[in-house]
Image (spheres, coloured by chain):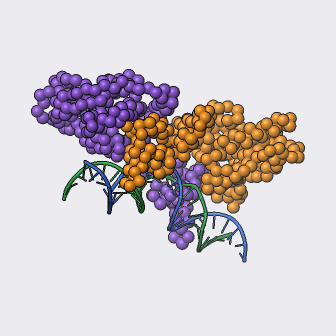
Chain colours: A orange, B purple, C blue, D green
Amino acid sequence: MTHLSVKALRHYHQVGLLEPARVDPQTGYRSYDTEQVPLAQVIRRFRDLDMPVDQVKEVLASPDVAGRNAVISEHLAQLSARLDQTRAAVASLRDLLEHPDTHPTIVHRSVPPIPAVAISQEVGTGELGSWWTGAFEELREYVTSCHLRPASWSGGVYAAALFEQERGDALVFIPVSGVAEGVGRVRPCTIPAAELAIAVHRGSHGDIDRTYGALGTYVAQRALGVEGPVREHYLVSGLETSDESKWQTEIGFPIFQT
Amino acid sequence: MTHLSVKALRHYHQVGLLEPARVDPQTGYRSYDTEQVPLAQVIRRFRDLDMPVDQVKEVLASPDVAGRNAVISEHLAQLSARLDQTRAAVASLRDLLEHPDTHPTIVHRSVPPIPAVAISQEVGTGELGSWWTGAFEELREYVTSCHLRPASWSGGVYAAALFEQERGDALVFIPVSGVAEGVGRVRPCTIPAAELAIAVHRGSHGDIDRTYGALGTYVAQRALGVEGPVREHYLVSGLETSDESKWQTEIGFPIFQT
DNA sequence: TTGCTCCTCACGTCACGTGAGGTGGC
DNA sequence: TTGCTCCTCACGTCACGTGAGGTGGC
């Protein structure tokens, strides 16, 4: 009747998602009422949308329609985001296979210490995107409210662990001078001086690994050492335009002669 | 450089997807060459598209571009199919929440034995869709090549195990008379007589469970017994139009008085 | 000598599917 | 008495992530 398998029904019983109307105490046989059919159908649809069982329970438990719709909308937004990501991955794969030998120009640059305001935190790669957006929103609000003028490009500083362990220290900053104290998560700081090997990545961050790979190959082949976190400067980013093909990201590997 | 985590690299080593260029026999330390970076980037993209590791191995192992592209295309087709399915599930969920009390009209009908040509097999629900399409293509080809005229609607007969155990006997048929022997998978047979409770499902098969649920509720509330496989008749189906909203499927539960 | 990095197990994740082995009711 | 259906464990799936515990090289 519901196109749920027997195994699924047993599982839903076990996790408390859909309880049988009666369970025979002698034999353990499960019985359901016809009134449970619509509920089962709703559950099946949520599961078809890959909504986790716990989240389905939440939706069914929330008594008000508003709260229920919020959970549903959030899940649909996640589906839509995954869809965008898939589309980007397809484009990125196609580009990689069609133009395998695209190499960016790499230059060396000494950067001095930069006074800035920054937000930093240990984050996982999964949440990095939303953290990045939220942090820059807060930074910009702070800079605007203090009538400060950015002295240069916004940037980020990312620990190696973030890439290697999927979790590590991230810091985003806007260069400004003369700030004594911060507000909220915003803190004044100085981005340390560094010797950088730099390349500009154009386009979506979905294939930013190509430029990372080119830089890494460059320093490995020249027997340069890499020490410290990677630096990024956002020449054009999601803060300016949602057209990802216009994005430009400067990537800097901190190097030293070995 | 590749945005693959250390854990992922170790895993890819273990399953033989990406072997380190050198492994120190003393310490077990893995070393990679810069030439492996592009390969790692391709792997990352396939995995971003949820291509199973074994399939990625297949793609990378296939020496000719044609075979490689075939595997890729097949995977992209699967992605696209899943996307359609998701879209359908969203529409189906919305419809269920907005119109929870839609009930089809249910009638009783005695059907006589029907001579037909059929293809039958034990199948899983996962492969049912493509099996169905392929089987009907073969049946139609047979009917056309023998200059037979269908005597009524095409149909299907589905064992309960197919719904309850995700795997069971399925049979699809085209009613024709006077066939002595089959070709390929096609076999002449007689669809047995039955007493049916019938409802017509309109629209995509994505929410055909609603009509199944309505029929099941109907027979349960009238204390009718259900015995034998479910019957479907395809009044309008994917064989006639790809516009799923136009589909009409007659569903018959075989009943008896208790 | 002390961190740091790399390593190897072993186990957890998530929603069931897959058997194995057993029992009640017709 | 014989199938049939329902049950309960226990384990497998898939691609890693998460610790625990240990070691080599600077």
* Residue A251 visible in the picture: yes
Q: Give the residue at x 44% y 44%.
A: A21
The front one of B135 and A178 is: B135
Question: Quadrant where the C terminus of chain B lies?
Answer: top left
Q: Position of residue C14 (x, y in %)?
A: 51, 50
* Residue A101 visible in the picture: no
- Tag count in the figure? 0
Which quadrant would residue B79 be assigned to in this image? Answer: top left
Q: Position of residue B18 (x, y in %)?
A: 48, 55
For residue B117, side relative to residue A3 (left or right): left
The front one of B154 and C4 is: B154
Q: Give the residue at x 71% y 40%.
A: A134
**Relative height, residue A116 to residue B13 (above, below):** above
Q: Where is residue A205 in the image (x, y as percent from the top left)?
A: 61, 41
Which quadrant would residue A211 be assigned to in this image? Answer: top right
Q: Where is residue B248 in the image (x, y as percent from the top left)?
A: 34, 24
